[in-house]
Amino acid sequence: MVLNERVSGKLGFDKICEDLANLCYLPRAKELAMSLKPYASFELVKEALEQTSEGKELLRLNPLFSIRGAKEIRNYLERVLRGGILTPEELLEIRDTLKASRFVKRSLRESKTPYPLLQGIMDQVDNPKGIEEELTRCITEDGKVADGASSTLAELRKSIQRLQNRIRETLEGILRSPSYQKMLQDPIITQRSERYVVPIKQEYRHAFSGIVHDQSASGATLYIEPMTVVNLGNELREVTLKEQREVQRILSLLSTQIEGEADCIADIHEALAKVDFILAKARLSEEMEGGAPILSPKREISLVQARYPLLTGKVVPLTIELGNRFDTVVVTGPNTGGKTVALKTIGLLAAMAQSGLHIPAESDSKIGIFSQIFADIGDEQSVEQSLSTFSGHMKNIVEIVEKADARSLILLDEVGAGTDPTEGAALAMAIIQEL
């Protein structure tokens, strides 16, 4: 591991990952951002930086480009693999994800500017044939099963419409009839327990022939289904149940089709998440006015006008060179002079570059690949572990000395602090000499 959690927090790398995650659209892309770690391989770092540069160029030429439309569908795929049936809304989200994949692939392929790395990610997946079209045919944009999903469903819904019209016509006749005017609480048609009813005054309960399905809170109004429409209501209920069974059959059939292509669809979702993640890296670069550093095969750092990205307001840039003419630098100066920020800037920018992120520094900045990044920065006092400030620092430094190798980047803040100045200075000299 190039960077452990403690050092990540000290340098501010975890905060950079949070900022990156906030720029992602898909939850899976956010997961990629939060789990981002520096690579130890020169080739992996090079590819990750080139992906970020491609994403930044893409957004520069096409600011509206995104994977919007894609949805978080992993839970749906897991459910169908367990034999579950998806709802129309869930199927629509899978359709939208496939549609987004097709759009992204076509946009990258037809672009006048080549984006080989982004296109390579999308070219690894292919939309399953017919799934998107079938979902579009069977599910409406408002998340309902379409009438045309099957001829049986279309006929059943026509029957439902005919029966509803006949019931309403009959009830409207009752509302208009002078014989029932005084019995009606209100001249309206409503529904109770999925049956069509009219509101009748309590005192006319026995004068009005029908079935009581509900009553008002005060008891003054009864909601009665007139006997003249009971048979029609029963028939409507039967047809409605058939329609519901047909809808479930269609949803089951569509879910089975999704199950057969679940692995393929999962790969498509993962590819979209990777593209989303790269675009987020590009947006982060734009926000911090960053750029890709020159990668060096040597163990070196050359930062030109570098800025600590987590500072706000006016930031004093840092220019520093390490690993070429000399491999050790001692930074001195007064308190609040920026020594700690300088160390954090070097460590954070090295970690960011090795993670494929652009850095806020001039384009001629150069960064090598380090096997590990160590940092002993800030107060290491721990009441729980009975460690003083000095003991805390020494514990970290002992660990660094034991684990560091020739390709490590080591950042030590106030070496020997917390003890006698003379002894601390001697200890600092010995540690530097050992490293």
Image (cartoon, grey):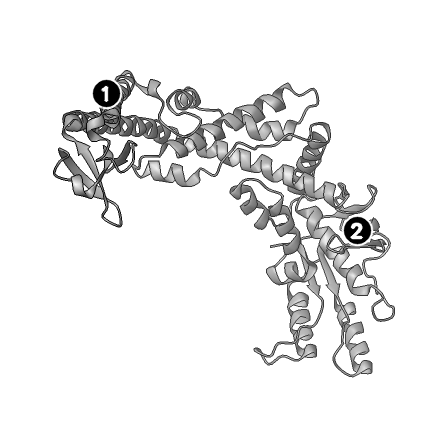
Quadrant including the C terminus: bottom right
Q: Is residue 358 visible?
A: no
In the image, residue 57 sits, relative to residue 338, either above or below, namely above
Question: In the shown orientation, is residue 411 left or right of residue 30?
Answer: right
Q: Nearer the viewer, residue 253 or 198?
A: 198
Residue 16 place in picture, x, y as percent: 66, 52
Tell me the SS state at disc 2.
strand
What amino acid is labelled 1 in the image? Arg
Q: Which residue is mark 1?
A: 166
Q: Nearer the viewer, residue 353 or 199?
A: 199
Residue sitting farthest toward the bottom: 420
In the image, residue 314 sits, relative to residue 395, either above or below, namely above
Question: In the shown orientation, is residue 267 left or right of residue 250?
Answer: right
Quadrant hosting residue 277: top right
Question: In the shown orientation, is residue 212 left or right of residue 84?
Answer: left
Question: How many circles with numbers are drawn on the protein?
Answer: 2
x 78%, y 61%: residue: 341
Quadrant including the N terminus: bottom right
What amino acid is labelled 2 in the image? Ile
Question: In the shown orientation, is residue 145 left or right of residue 370?
Answer: left
Quadrant hosting residue 191: top left
> What is the CA distance from the residue labelled 2 to the residue labelled 1?
83 Å
Q: Which residue is mark 2?
A: 301
Q: Nearer the viewer, residue 206 or 240?
A: 206
x 50%, y 25%: residue: 99
Residue 76 place in picture, x, y as percent: 39, 38
Residue 201 place in picture, x, y as percent: 22, 40
Mark 2–mark 1 CB contact (< 8 Å): no
Residue 181 place in picture, x, y as percent: 24, 31
